[in-house]
Image (cartoon, helix red, strand yellow):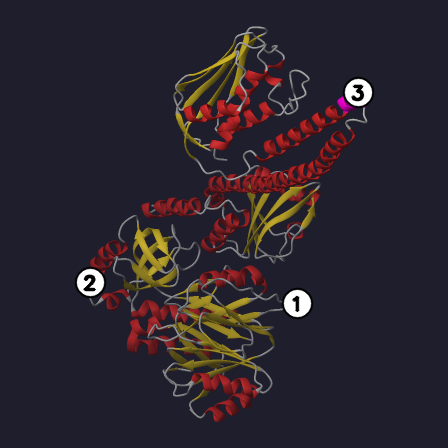
C-alpha cells in the first residue's frame, strides 16, 4: 500500500487500518515531506510493531516515487530486532528457535553506507543458516551522506540494521544482467570498500584501460561516475551470476572507492550492460520467483538505485517487465519495494551476499 | 575448443583459495577465512569438520554454526571408510546423523584431512563435481597443515601461559618460604645472643661452644635461604643493561673479599661489556671467592683473564688450589651439590654462577687436576646483555 499524505496522524491511522494486528514493513522515499524522527516517534506511540528504512526512491506497483511511504504487512512475525554497530562488528545476533519443517523468511534493512555489511550478513548466515530465506536491502540517501536511515520500535538509527523473521515461505529471484568485458583480474590490495591495487598495479589505470577501450570514452577529471556507472566490477562466483560492485569514485591516490567491500585476492571482471540485458535480467529475476511460488500474498522488489541512474527513462521498462511477469501469474498481487543502496539475498539459498546493481524480487506466501 | 580464459580462471581461483589459507594461527579464524570463501565462490550451503576425540568424533567447526556434535566413530567410519583423499556422495540419513546441521536433499563432498579429521561440504543442489574435488585437493591439503599449525600454536600458547603461572607461583613460593624461614631464624639468633651475653659465666666451656655452634648454624641457614632466594629470582626480574667495565668490577670485588696475604691475584685486561653490574659482580665474586677459599698452597696464585671469541667473550679464573675430582665437574653446578662439607659453603654459589652465565647465553665449564689447581671457563654473548 502507498501512503501519500504527509500528515503523520493520518499516516499512522492508514497503517493501523491496513495491517490490523500484524507488524508492518515501512519503506520511505527520502524526499517525503515528513519529519522522519517525528514519524518514528509517532509509530512508537501507536502500539504498532514496525521496521523500516529511508530510501532514495520507493516502488509501488509500476511507479517509482521519490516521495511516499510504501507499507507491507509482516504476517506471522516471529521476531523483530535491531542490530547496532555494524561497522565495528560489536554486536551479537540473537538466537531464534526455528520450528522444524516450517518455512521462514528473514527481511533486513541495513544502513547501506556503513562498513562491514558483508560481515553482518555472514553473521546472520552463521547463526540462522539454511533455516530461513533472506531478503533485504541497503537504506540511505542518494546524497551518499550517512545519516539515521533504518528504524524500528527502538527508534531510528545509522550504522545499524533492522531485522524481521517471519514464519512464512518466500520465493526469491536474483539477477543483474551485467556482462563481462574485461578480466579476470586479481584485487591484490584492498581495504574495506577501496580497491588499492589490481594485478599489483594502480587500479584506476587497469580499469581505465579496459573501460576506455570498450566504451570509446575518455576519463576526465569530472566524468568518472558518468562512465563508471556503466562499468561495474563483478566478483567471480561459480555456477551463478557474479556479484556486482559499483565503483563510485577515485580518491587522491588513484584508488577506486566502491559501494560494498572487496576482499584481497578476490577475482573480478569488469562488466558492462545495456538496456536490453538489464531489463531482461530483471524479468528473469521476476520469473524465477514466480516459478517457485505457490500462493503469494505480496511481492517486494528490491532494486538498485544505480540501475535507474544507468537506465534513466528506460527503468520504467525494467519495472514493467517485473510487474508484468508477476501479474501474468498473479494479477491481483500487490507489489511494493524500494530502490536501495545495495541488495541482500543469496543465490540458490546459499551463502548470503551483498550485491550492487542487482534486482531482487521476493514473493511472500 | 576450451577457451584459454577458462584455464586461467581455474588457476586464478586456486590463487584465491590458496591465499585464504595460512593467514591466521587461530583455528576458528583460519576455518572462517577459507571455508566461507569456498561457500561463497562455489555457491554451497554448509560445511563442517569432524575430528576424532577419544573414541568418538566431534565437530570442531561448522558453518552455519549448528549444534556442537559428538558422534560415534562407527558412523563416521561407515561414511569415510574408503576415502583416501576425497569423494562426493548424495546426502543420506547416515550423513545427516553425523552432521551438526539439518540437511535436506543434496550432495556432500568429503575431504580426508588426515590427523585433522574430515571436512564436509554440503550443497542443496547438484553443483559439486569431480573436477571441483581435483581442484580443491591440493589447497585442502594445505588447509589441513594450517589447521595443524593452529593447534600446535594454541598448545604452545597454553604451555607458555601455564609456565608463566608456574614460574610466578615458584617465585612467590620462594619469597614466602624464605620470609617465613628467616623469621624464626632471627628469633633463634637473638635468643642465643642474649643467652651468650647473660649466661656466659654460668655455662661451662662446652655449653659456650654449643651456643657458638648454634649461632654459626643459624648464620649458615640464613646464607642458604638468601642463596635460594637469589637463585630463584635470577632471570625473573627486569634488568637495566648498561656498560660495565670488568676491570673496575674485579677491583671492587678484591677490595670487598678478604684475600689472605699468601694468595696473589693477577688480573689481565678485561673488556667492558653491556649488562647488569649486580649480577656480573655475583658471577665474578663467587668464582674468585671460591678460588680464594679453597686454596691450600703456601703461595696461592689466582689469575683472572679474558679473550675475544667471535660473538662471545671467554673468561677464565685459574687457581693453584686443591683441585676438583673429575666426577664433580658437572655436579658442582647443581643446587646443593658441594665438594666438601664446610660450615660456610651452602652449595648454591656455583648454581647461581651457572644461571647468570646462561642469562648471557654463555656456557661454563672447568679443567682441574687434584692438588694442582682448577681453571673455570665461561663465555658471555656480546649482544645478550643478560636480558631475559
- Residue A198: horizontal and vertical position, in percent? 30, 52
Q: Nearer the viewer, residue B265 or B385?
A: B265
Asked where in the image residue B100 lies, by quadrant, the reply is bottom right
- Residue B16: horizontal and vertical position, in percent? 41, 48
Q: Secondary structure at mark 1?
A: loop
Spatial CA span between label 1 and label 2: 55 Å
**Crowdedness of circle 3 by 10 Å Cα count: few (<14), some, many (20+)?**
few
Mark 1 or mark 2: whose residue is earlier in sequence: 1
- Residue B12: horizontal and vertical position, in percent? 37, 46
Question: Is residue B338 left or right of A18 when viewed as pictured?
Answer: right
Is residue B83 at least partly visible in the picture? no
Residue marked by disc 1: A99
- Residue found 48% across the figure and 28% down from its top: B360
Question: Vertical placement of B316 versus A165: above or below?
Answer: above
Start and end of the magenta stretch? B204-210
Question: Is residue A316 left or right of B147 when viewed as pictured?
Answer: left
Question: Vertical placement of B262 versus A307: above or below?
Answer: above
Which marked residue is nearer to the observer: mark 3 or mark 1? 3
Which marked residue is nearer to the observer: mark 3 or mark 2? 3
Disc 2: host chain: A
Disc 1: host chain: A
Q: Secondary structure at mark 2?
A: loop
- Residue found 53% across the figure and 75% down from its top: A364
Residue marked by disc 3: B206
**Crowdedness of circle 2 by 10 Å Cα count: few (<14), some, many (20+)?**
some
Question: Is residue B93 left or right of A279 when viewed as pictured?
Answer: right
Is residue A256 at least partly visible in the picture? yes
Q: Are marks 3 and 2 on the same chain?
A: no
Say the numbered circle drawn on residue A219: 2
Amino acid at each position: 500500500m502507498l501512503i501519500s499524505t504527509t500528515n503523520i496522524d493520518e499516516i499512522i491511522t492508514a497503517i493501523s487500518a491496513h495491517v490490523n494486528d500484524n507488524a508492518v514493513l515501512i519503506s520511505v522515499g527520502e524526499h517525503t515531506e515528513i519529519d522522519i524522527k517525528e514519524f518514528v516517534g509517532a509509530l512508537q506511540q501507536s502500539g504498532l510493531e514496525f521496521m523500516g528504512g529511508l530510501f532514495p526512491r520507493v516502488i509501488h506497483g509500476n511507479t517509482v516515487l521519490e516521495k511516499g511511504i510504501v507499507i507491507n504487512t509482516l504476517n506471522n512475525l516471529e521476531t523483530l530486532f535491531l542490530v547496532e554497530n555494524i561497522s565495528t562488528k560489536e554486536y551479537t545476533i540473537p538466537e531464534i528457535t526455528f520450528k522444524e519443517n516450517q518455512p521462514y523468511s528473514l527481511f533486513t534493512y541495513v544502513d547501506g553506507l556503513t562498513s562491514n555489511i558483508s560481515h553482518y550478513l555472514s553473521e546472520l548466515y552463521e547463526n540462522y543458516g539454511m533455516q530461513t530465506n533472506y531478503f533485504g536491502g541497503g537504506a540511505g540517501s542518494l546524497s551518499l551522506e550517512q545519516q539515521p536511515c533504518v528504524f524500528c520500535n527502538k527508534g531510528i538509527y545509522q550504522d545499524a540494521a533492522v531485522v524481521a523473521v517471519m514464519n512464512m515461505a518466500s520465493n526469491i529471484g536474483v539477477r543483474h544482467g551485467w556482462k563481462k568485458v574485461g578480466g579476470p583480474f586479481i584485487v591484490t590490495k584492498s581495504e574495506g570498500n577501496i580497491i588499492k591495487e589490481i594485478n599489483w598495479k594502480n587500479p584506476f589505470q587497469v580499469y581505465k584501460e579496459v573501460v576506455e577501450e570498450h566504451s570509446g570514452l575518455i576519463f576526465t577529471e569530472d566524468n568518472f561516475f558518468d562512465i563508471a556507472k556503466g562499468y561495474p566490477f563483478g566478483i567471480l562466483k561459480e555456477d551463478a551470476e557474479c556479484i556486482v560492485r559499483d565503483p563510485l569514485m577515485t580518491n587522491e591516490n588513484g584508488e577506486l572507492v566502491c559501494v560494498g567491500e572487496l576482499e584481497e585476492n578476490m577475482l573480478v571482471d569488469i562488466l558492462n550492460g545495456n538496456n536490453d540485458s538489464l531489463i531482461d535480467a530483471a524479468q528473469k529475476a521476476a520469473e524465477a520467483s514466480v516459478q517457485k511460488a505457490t500462493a503469494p500474498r505480496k511481492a517486494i522488489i528490491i532494486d538498485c538505485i544505480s540501475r535507474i541512474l544507468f537506465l534513466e527513462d528506460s527503468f520504467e521498462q525494467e519495472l514493467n517487465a517485473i510487474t508484468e511477469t508477476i501479474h501474468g501469474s498473479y494479477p491481483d498481487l500487490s507489489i511494493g519495494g524500494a530502490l536501495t543502496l545495495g541488495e541482500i539475498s543469496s543465490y540458490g539459498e546459499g551463502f548470503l551476499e551483498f550485491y550492487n546493481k542487482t534486482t531482487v524480487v521476493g514473493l511472500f506466501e | 575448443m576450451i577457451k584459454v580464459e577458462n584455464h586461467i580462471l581455474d588457476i586464478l581461483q586456486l590463487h584465491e583459495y590458496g591465499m585464504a589459507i595460512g593467514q591466521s594461527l587461530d583455528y576458528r579464524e583460519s576455518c572462517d577465512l577459507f571455508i566461507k570463501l569456498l561457500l561463497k565462490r562455489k555457491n554451497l550451503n554448509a560445511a563442517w569438520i569432524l575430528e576424532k576425540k577419544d573414541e568418538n568424533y566431534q565437530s570442531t567447526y561448522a558453518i552455519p554454526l549448528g549444534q556442537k556434535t559428538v558422534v560415534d566413530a562407527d558412523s563416521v567410519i561407515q561414511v569415510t571408510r574408503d576415502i583416501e583423499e576425497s569423494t562426493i556422495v548424495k546426502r543420506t540419513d547416515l550423513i545427516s546423523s553425523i552432521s551438526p546441521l539439518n540437511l535436506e536433499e543434496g550432495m556432500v563432498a568429503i575431504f580426508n584431512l588426515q590427523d585433522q579429521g574430515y571436512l564436509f561440504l554440503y550443497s542443496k543442489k547438484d553443483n559439486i563435481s569431480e573436477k571441483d574435488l581435483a581442484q580443491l585437493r591440493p589447497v585442502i591439503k594445505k588447509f589441513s597443515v594450517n589447521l595443524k599449525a593452529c593447534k600446535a600454536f594454541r598448545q604452545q600458547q597454553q604451555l607458555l601461559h601455564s609456565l608463566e603461572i608456574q614460574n610466578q607461583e615458584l617465585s612467590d613460593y620462594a619469597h614466602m618460604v624464605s620470609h617465613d624461614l628467616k623469621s624464626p631464624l632471627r628469633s633463634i639468633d637473638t635468643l642465643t645472643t642474649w643467652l651468650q651475653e647473660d649466661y656466659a659465666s654460668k655455662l661451662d666451656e662446652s655449653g659456650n661452644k654449643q651456643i657458638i655452634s648454634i649461632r654459626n648454624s643459624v648464620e649458615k641457614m640464613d646464607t642458604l635461604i638468601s642463596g635460594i632466594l637469589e637463585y630463584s629470582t635470577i632471570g625473573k626480574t627486569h634488568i637495566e643493561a648498561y656498560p660495565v667495565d670488568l676491570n673496575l668490577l674485579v677491583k671492587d670485588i678484591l677490595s670487598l673479599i678478604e684475600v689472605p696475604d699468601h694468595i696473589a691475584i693477577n688480573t689481565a685486561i678485561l673488556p667492558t661489556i653491556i649488562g647488569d653490574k649486580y649480577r656480573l659482580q655475583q658471577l665474578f665474586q663467587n668464582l674468585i671467592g671460591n678460588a680464594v677459599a679453597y686454596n691450600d698452597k703456601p703461595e696461592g696464585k689466582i689469575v683472572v683473564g679474558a679473550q675475544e671469541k667471535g660473538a662471545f667473550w671467554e673468561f677464565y679464573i685459574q687457581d693453584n688450589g686443591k683441585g676438583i675430582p673429575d666426577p664433580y665437574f658437572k655436579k658442582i653446578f647443581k643446587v646443593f651439590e658441594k665438594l666438601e662439607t664446610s660450615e660456610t659453603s651452602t652449595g648454591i654459589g656455583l648454581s647461581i654462577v651457572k644461571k647468570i652465565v646462561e642469562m648471557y647465553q654463555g656456557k661454563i665449564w672447568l679443567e682441574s687436576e687434584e692438588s694442582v689447581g682448577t681453571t673455570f671457563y665461561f663465555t658471555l654473548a656480546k649482544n645478550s646483555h643478560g636480558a631475559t
